Image: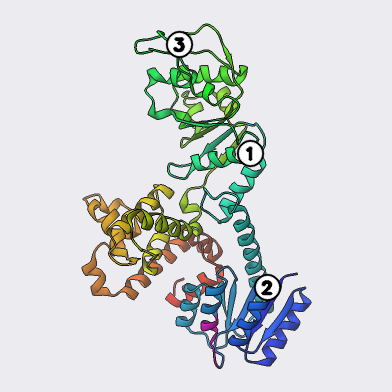
Amino acid sequence: MTSILVVDDERSMRDFLKILLVKEGYQVETAPGGRQALKLIKRTVFNLVITDIRMDGMTGLELLGSIKEQQPSLPVVMITAFASPNDAVFAMKNGAFDYISKPFNVDEIKSVIVSATSKNDLVAEAKSLSASFPEIIGESREMVKIFEMIKRIAPTPANVLIYGESGTGKELVAQAIHRHSQVVDQDFIPITCSAIPEELMESELFGHVKGSFTGAISDKQGLFQLADNGTAFLDEIGELTPIIQTKLLRVLQEREVKPVGGIKVQNVNVRIIAATNKILEEEIMAGRFREDLYYRLAVVPLRVPPLRERKGDVPLLVDFFLKKYSRAFGKEVQEMSSYAMEVLMKYDFPGNVRELENIVERGVALESSNIILPESLTLSTFRSEKTSNESQTNSPFQVVANEEELFSLGLEEVMAETEKKLLTAALEKSNNSKMGAADLLRISFRSLRYKVKKYGIG
């Protein structure tokens, strides 16, 4: 049963919420203040905390801070009869799930509770699944789907086609599939198809015999012989020439290879995992990729989402890369400043996770303090790229590229103006649908409604 803690210094409000929530099937505890609430949280597992903001002694905002220090994943909903824009902004920036003004609609608070507890369940599921895949950093809904798919397909011998943009981590997914397969004790042999000259590709895939061509001074095993009884990973499969595609198709159909210059065929039992950043259906239509080969490879298609579609994983990835490069460089850079993180969260990352890693690596290398500031990100990644084409770049790092303009306006004004422009653009793109705009901006409907009212938009 979902357990909720209600914290309010007004007994009438505590009793009202308890009666309401118990009728909805929740298990409810109450506390008259923040300190009593923290004691309950230490000895009881709660799925949600609902707290007033203005209370005697410890305020709701102080309680929020303490809860997030102890249990970062525990959702907290703030309620108050004294709505303050500053309190709302502070609460949301410091991890509150939502902010509700009294008097509130009963159906409204029920909806918020369902959303908060559902998200908590998803986070718990994500943490459980991600623990099984330490090589892949992510706890977003999109990555949970990837983890679930890997668990389903890994034990089977089915060929897998992984597709996604460059830098999304397709090889890591392939490795995870192999590691959870029935042939985990066998070899995982990777090959990048675009990195091998066309004239050598056949030899790399199928091997060759001594004297079969100039430079063939001895017999050589190819990818399929080396991966026999294990897994062969063919990255950038869309780069294969038509001739090699034809020969690869025969291997998949007959489960046998013939080395270059050889006479005898060799039986092989290999699971194929291929990857591409191309849309192979379009390549087929253009006559550049064999349709029959595609269906042999894509028994199970698996899409790895770009980083812009799983922005919730950015803080996790940043933390991972900060630790990685702090150790590598012998530094103690412990965190990303809040404003630097905001800038990252607004960026689309055309280079995906690989680009984020590069940004953090440079930031750690350049930073002289123990916290990465926006200036380090700008200098390491974008300032040197300010050219005549700069106006065509959609990078939000440009907000901080001109320090003189920033200083003349002030940080709060720059942030407010940027937020207002994004809100306006999202509303226009969604035909003035607040729900659609909230989805585009990856914020809650309530947060969007608050911000629209704050800036007088629409």
Q: Is residue 62 magenta?
A: yes
Q: Quadrant of the N terminus?
A: bottom right
Residue on which the image places disc 1: 154
User: What amino acid type is highlighted by mark number 3?
Assistant: Val
| Dot 2 or dot 3, earlier in sequence | 2
- Label 1 neighbour load within 10 Å: few <14, some 14-19, many 20+: many
Q: Is residue 70 magenta?
A: no
Residue at image mark 2: 45
The quarter holding residue 100 reads bottom right
Give the percent coordinates (x, y) of residue 23: 78, 77
**For the residue labelled by badge 3, is the local secondary structure a helix, a strand or a loop?**
loop
Side of 29 relative to 376 (left or right): right
Distance from the alpha carbon under mark 2 to that under mark 3: 66 Å
Looking at the rendered structure, the kind of residue marked 1 is: Ala
Q: Residue at x 67, y 88 (%)?
A: 13
Mark earlier in primary sequence (1, 2)? 2
Secondary structure, mark 2, is loop
